[in-house]
Image: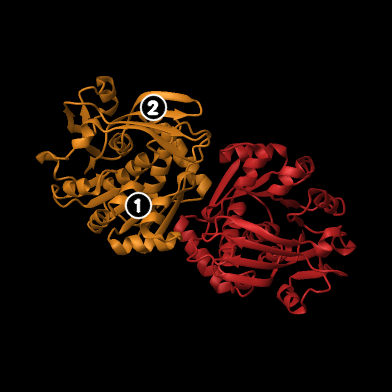
Chain colours: A orange, B red
């Protein structure tokens, strides 16, 4: 089993109340793969520029991660600069340089076209669709997006969602897309569109999901201190899809397990700047936190 | 076992996007008793004016509710007028008439002074303290408050909390009182103050609690449509304390059950204007929703 992830590998400059950390390894495909590789094989399709530091590549290298689809193109790497408010409740993009990403037209290497799962990270829905047209019947097609595409490429996004099995949205995005307010109504609207699995992320509260008519709720792991929320959504998605991809059957109980694991992995992500905490996460530390979260939530996994 | 609740019985005029409902039965002691009476005996100490409609008293009357401490005084009943924003994310007090509540100095009838639990609903912390000075060693002293008292009577409130066993706060109030941002830090600060049980309410996300060092998280029941959130916090508190008061021992598992039951009862509260949905709630409907919430959350109660 293996997940094909198409998204960004980027250089982030992150400003929080504590200061600015320039040129951190970032990007949706990065955070996703660092999480998902704990449970399954991951194949990254993305592009960086010739300026991409080799030392950062070593963070991505892993026995379970196939980097053959990571193109190094003439030009500069996608760079994002963001500033978080003191309590991390909001963020502002203070700089953006698309670099090689501006002309990024994902071409899936032939050998990667048969993957059991596909994760279409947040990029233009037309490009997400272009990826889908190149892959051979994956078991699970998962889509992430942001408010920008909901506002400006609504129709293309909806066409894409009709073909997908799982969609990740945060509450604001779900409200914007569905025009509903209650979780139930949002979930029903999205499932009626196509995806049989819908996951709405609620930040530090947790996440609510549906598989068919069954609803699944999991809490976020209560971290002591958030240092940088960048990548929390992508690492949560990596945990969820990693578990789902590795599972023989996907049902309500497996979805709960997947979301709980995603919640734990997302909690490590926000505790470090960039990928730092995720990259150095050990199995025992993951297990301890998982056990704690199960105790806090009273959740028994089957 | 019985809970003594000291709070308000009021007439509320509630405005939502759907219109205005005048003179609804309201008040913290009202919502609390309608919830808690499902599990234990409740004794209300409050005051209304001579204008209080007799037909509303019938809603409060119940085999498990002792109204002997509900004084009918010369003057008018406490009236509150509030307007909710369209999505219920905020509310504004548009009118307030204290009436007999202005001079309310709770005197606990001798026969009610020995109660196993005491719920000090949101009133001036000095009055909450006055109640405490009249009761004989309850097993559980629970305190609710609002931002107004945190801002203006901080010292009196903190003195009161030192003597209490359980405090209910919403997230905003907890942040204001503790000056902390993470759930863990808020909980630790509050427990260090005195209460061995701390519950922080998170609106439509759920609630997080601690008993000693053990943390307990429960989701809110996902309602299809909120019609009026007035009283949601007090009915949640009524569910929680009702279960705790009826329990032989209070531990982490009982607290989880209590918060889960409180969550379910709060979900009925918000579905009707004023007390309407709570007052007509049947046992089978409660049980069905409890079963659903356990399934959604994966929580197994011991």
Quadrant occupied by the N terminus of chain B: bottom right
In the image, is A13 to the left or to the right of A2?
A: right
x, y percentage for residue B27?
72, 64
Quadrant occupied by the C terminus of chain B: bottom right
In the image, is B260 to the left or to the right of B124?
A: left
In the image, is B279 to the left or to the right of A169?
A: right
The residue at which mark 1 appears reads as A254
Chain letter of the residue beneath label 2 in the structure image: A
In the image, is A166 to the left or to the right of B245?
A: left
The one of A33 and A94 positioned closer to us in this rendering? A94
Q: Quadrant of residue A285?
A: top left
Question: Mark 1: few, some, or many residues within 10 Å (few <14, many ≥20)?
Answer: some
Q: Residue at x 21, y 52 (%)?
A: A139
Number of residue marks: 2
> Residue farthest to the left?
A110
Nearer to us of marks 2 and 1 is 2
Q: Residue at x 54, y 72 (%)?
A: B285
Q: Is residue A206 above or below residue A65?
A: below
> In the rendering, which numbered label is found on residue B79?
none
Q: Is residue B26 above or below residue B301?
A: below
Q: Is residue B302 visible?
A: no
Mark with earlier residue (2, 1) = 1
The one of A202 and B148 positioned closer to us in this rendering? B148
Chain letter of the residue beneath label 1 in the structure image: A
x, y percentage for residue B70?
82, 68
x, y percentage for residue A144?
31, 47
The residue at which mark 2 appears reads as A276
């Amino acid at each position: 089993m293996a997940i094909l992830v198409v998204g960004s590998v980027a250089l982030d400059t992150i400003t929080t109340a504590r200061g600015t950390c320039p040129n951190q390894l970032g990007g949706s495909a990065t955070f996703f793969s660092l999480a998902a590789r704990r449970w399954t094989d991951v194949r990254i399709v993305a592009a960086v520029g010739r300026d991409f530091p080799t030392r950062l590549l070593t963070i991505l290298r892993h026995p379970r991660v196939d980097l053959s689809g990571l193109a190094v193109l003439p030009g500069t790497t996608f760079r994002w600069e963001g500033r978080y408010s003191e309590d991390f409740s909001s963020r502002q993009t203070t700089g953006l340089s698309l670099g090689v990403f501006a002309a990024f037209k994902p071409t899936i290497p032939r050998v990667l076209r048969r993957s059991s799962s596909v994760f279409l990270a947040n990029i233009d829905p037309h490009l997400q669709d272009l990826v889908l047209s190149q892959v051979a019947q994956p078991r699970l097609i998962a889509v992430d997006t942001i408010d920008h595409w909901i506002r400006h490429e609504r129709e293309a996004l909806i066409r894409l969602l009709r073909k997908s099995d799982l969609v990740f949205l945060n509450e604001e995005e779900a409200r914007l897309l569905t025009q509903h307010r209650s979780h139930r109504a949002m979930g029903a609207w999205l499932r009626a569109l196509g995806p049989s699995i819908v996951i709405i992320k609620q930040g530090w509260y947790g996440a609510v999901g549906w598989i068919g008519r069954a609803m699944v709720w999991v809490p976020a792991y209560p971290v002591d201190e958030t240092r940088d929320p960048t990548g929390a959504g992508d690492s949560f998605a990596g945990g969820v899809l990693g578990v789902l991809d590795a599972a023989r059957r996907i049902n309500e109980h497996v979805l709960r397990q997947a979301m709980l694991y995603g919640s734990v992995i997302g909690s490590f992500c926000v505790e470090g700047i960039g990928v730092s905490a995720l990259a150095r996460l050990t199995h025992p530390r993951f297990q301890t936190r998982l056990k704690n979260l199960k105790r806090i939530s009273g959740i028994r996994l089957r």
